Image: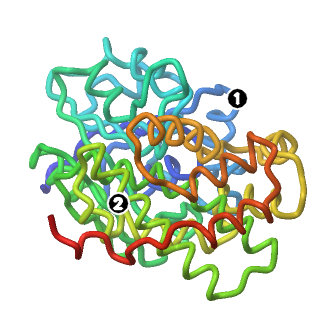
């Protein structure tokens, strides 16, 4: 695709800023929308997102604005990089501004807060924008490393090859590679579920867990993710890719992950409310834990790590008691999909 597109990125957080910068560097007409007029004005003047990505200069042709109509009108492609609790409201705002052929892609890794059932972000797009082609972008992608031009891979998932090809051509660069997948639900579930396990791994690290323990947690986390996803209708093989095991490893082993930092602080004995308040950014894993625990119970899916973390955070159980219960529980198969039917 050699033509220059108009691309809108909604959300002035770290990831939205990072992908908007890639697209601008690829010579597309790129608009980054921020809710705060003051923040947008400052970022535009300095060509830097000092709140989320301080010290990194953004492309001079990137337009940063709080004007939603200016951002959306005439856009060929829209990325929605909005936290789950505000996602639906923003999508409703943009609906009357979208062109008939505008494609819309979610980059948010979460589940809509309670009140709407178990709803992923692309399902909100389906519900609110039924006439538009949609997709999901997800993978092991720390924004800080993207703007440093570290070699990074991500996944675009959509039922539409038009969306896949457009996103690949728009985002690809010497340091950013975009892989394709048609299992939109599986890719999106991977991005949401791994946040729960990042909290668990952060907590374990704070408690002095060794490499053996971390390896066990990562592997059993992947088993739980695949088990849940299969019952929900996704392909468990999707979890062997970047959006599954790739994102899980990244998020569960680095203190650049907000959810890992939440877990680490919990392991140090700090209260959850205080941790979340001090974070300054959204940690999707806490809300996702609520939603997944409820859904797993409803469907009868065996998810001992999810149940254990829920017991620690919301049922007053001691970490040591839960850890002991996990170790003496039923011995499970290592790789369930080797059993056959």
Q: Which residue is mark 1?
A: 38
The answer to whether 177 appears left or right of 180 in the picture is right
What residue sits 57% from the left and 59% below the top?
305
Q: Nearer the viewer, residue 247 or 144?
A: 247
Screen quadrant of the N terminus: bottom left
At which x and y percent is residue 296?
A: 45, 42
Task: Let me know if residue 287 appears in the view.
Answer: yes
According to the picture, the residue beneath numbered tag 2 turns out to be 226
Say which residue appears at 62% left-offset and 79% top-offset: 214
Element on which disc 1 rests:
helix
Tally of marks: 2
Label 2 sits on a secondary structure element that is helix
Q: Is residue 67 above or below residue 275?
A: above
Crowding near the residue tagged with mark 2, few <14, some 14–19, many ≥20 C-alpha atoms within 10 Å? many
Residue in the image at 31% along x and 11% along y: 96
Alpha carbon distance from label 1 to label 2: 43 Å
**Residue drawn at the location 43% of the way across and 67% of the way down:** 222
In primary-sequence order, the first of circles 1 and 2 is 1
Q: Residue furthest left?
A: 161
Query: Quadrant of residue 13 in the image?
Result: top right
């Amino acid at each position: 695709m050699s033509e220059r597109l108009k691309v809108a990125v909604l959300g002035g957080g770290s990831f939205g800023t990072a992908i908007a910068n890639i697209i601008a560097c690829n010579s597309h007409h790129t608009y980054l929308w921020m809710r705060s007029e003051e923040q947008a004005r400052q970022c535009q003047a300095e060509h830097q997102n000092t709140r989320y990505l301080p010290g990194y200069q953004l492309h001079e042709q990137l337009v940063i604005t709080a004007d939603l109509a200016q951002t959306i009108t005439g856009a060929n492609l829209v990325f929605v990089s909005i936290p789950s609790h505000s996602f639906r409201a923003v999508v409703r705002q943009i609906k009357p501004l979208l062109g008939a052929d505008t494609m819309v892609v979610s980059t948010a890794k979460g589940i809509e807060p309670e009140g709407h059932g178990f709803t992923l972000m692309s399902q909100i797009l389906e519900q609110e924008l039924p006439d538009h082609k949609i997709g999901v972008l997800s993978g092991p992608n720390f924004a800080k490393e993207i703007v440093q031009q570290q070699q990074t891979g991500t996944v675009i998932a959509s039922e539409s090859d038009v969306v896949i090809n457009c996103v690949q051509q728009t985002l690809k660069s010497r340091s950013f590679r975009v892989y394709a997948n048609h299992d939109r639900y599986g890719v999106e579930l991977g991005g949401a579920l791994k946040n729960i396990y990042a909290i668990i791994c952060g907590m374990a690290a704070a408690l002095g867990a060794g490499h053996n323990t971390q390896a066990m947690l990562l592997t059993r986390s992947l088993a739980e993710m695949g088990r849940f996803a299969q019952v929900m209708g996704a392909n468990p093989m999707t979890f062997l890719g970047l959006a599954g095991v790739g994102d899980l490893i990244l998020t569960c082993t680095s203190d650049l992950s907000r959810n890992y930092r939440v877990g680490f602080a919990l392991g140090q004995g700090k209260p959850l409310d205080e941790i979340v308040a001090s974070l300054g950014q959204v940690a999707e894993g806490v809300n996702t834990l609520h939603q997944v625990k409820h859904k797993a119970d409803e469907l009868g899916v065996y998810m001992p790590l999810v149940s254990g973390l829920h017991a620690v955070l919301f049922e007053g159980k001691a970490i040591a008691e839960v850890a002991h219960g996990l170790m003496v529980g039923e011995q499970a198969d290592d790789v369930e999909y080797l059993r056959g039917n």
